Structures are given as structure tokens and as C-alpha cells.
Image: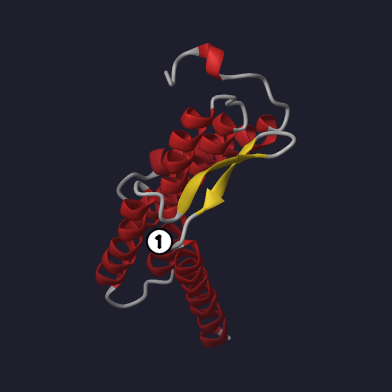
Amino acid sequence: MGIFDLANYTFNLHSIPVSIVGWSILGIGIIALRRSSKSSIHRAFFALTFATSWWLIGYGFIYNVINVPLAAFLVKFAWGGVALISPGVYAFTVTFLELPRAQWRIFWSYLLFLAFVFTITFGLISKGVYQLPWFLYSGSGPLLPTFLIAFFLQMVLVFWFYVRALRDSA
């Protein structure tokens, strides 16, 4: 199952857009961080872009894998990025809107989703892979619905924060 063994990979056209977007997002995050690494907004933005690029770059690799055990391992790795997108968006929003108790809110958000990252290693969020006509893709584990509910509830909360901020500024 060597991750560096080229015999485990093939070229798949579907991986190109995902990989390009992943690397581009990471580049944007690095540019923002380099402009002002002391700014909490820039650091929160980098955390968001890092998690998003982790997911996309990971799936860019997975789409090229032909070895099922290796793909199952890489899926767990890529899902680590997925699990950190929501707290990254939340951290950026709380920092950008200068909400009270920002550090406390960010800490609890990451703590909740780090618990999901931990469950990924046991196949409770993403379980194995299955073959689609064009590439291998991740299966769902028993805790995936719970993860998705937490993920999207936090996204709805972020949306509500922005709506409230826009309403209050008018």
C-alpha cells in the first residue's frame, strides 16, 4: 500500500479541476497570511483556506488512486480537512464580525469538530471506498448524518451572524 509507489496511481482527468482549486485556495490563504501574519482575521482566513485545500487536494489524489486500501487511507486523511472547514468558517466569521468572547467560541467550535476528526480514524464518518465509473469515492459511516447536522447547523449559525450584522449596520 505504499503511498509513494507510483503503481498505485493512474492519471484521471477528474482530478485536475479539484486539485487546481485546492492548490489555488491554499495559495490565496498563504498570500493573506503573509500580508499580515499578526492579524487575527488573516490567521482565521488561512485556517479556513487550509482546511478547504486539505480536503480538495486530498480528493485530487484520491481520484488518481487505483489501490483500494490506499484510497481508503487517503479518504480518512481528506475527511480531516472536511471536518475542519466548518470551524474554520466559524472562526473567520466570529473574528471578522468581532463577536464577543471570540476566543471561547472558536475554541469550542474546534473542540467539537476535532472530536469528529478523531472518529474518522475509526471509520465512523467515512467508511471505506467504492468504485464509481470514473474514480474511487468514499462511503459513509454511521456517524455521517450526525456530522452533517453539526456541520450545517454551524453554517446556518454563521449565516445568521452575517444577517444580523447586516441588519444592525443598516
Q: Measured from the top left, where is residue 12 in percent x and y?
A: 69, 25
Inspect the image, locate mark 1, and give the three-letter code of the amino acid beneath it.
Pro
Q: Judge by depth and name the residue closer to the eye, 74 or 88.
A: 74
Q: Is residue 85 above or below residue 96?
A: above
Q: Is residue 130 above or below residue 105?
A: above
Q: Measured from the top left, where is residue 39 in percent x and y?
A: 34, 53
Residue at 56% x, 38% y is 59
Residue at 55% x, 49% y is 139
Left or right, 54 with reference to 100: right
Count of labels shown?
Answer: 1
Image color mode:
secondary structure
In the rendered image, which residue does mark 1 sit on?
87
Q: Quadrant of the C terminus?
A: bottom right
Mark 1 packing: few (<14 Cα in 10 Å), some, or many (20+)? many
Q: Is residue 3 above or below residue 99?
A: above
Q: Is residue 102 above or below residue 75?
A: below
Residue at 48% x, 66% y is 151
Left or right, 19 with reference to 109: right
Res. 29 in view: no
Query: Splitting the image into 4 quarters, where does residue 106 fall?
Result: bottom left
Left or right, 22 with reference to 70: right
Q: Measured from the top left, where is residue 71 in percent x and y?
A: 51, 32
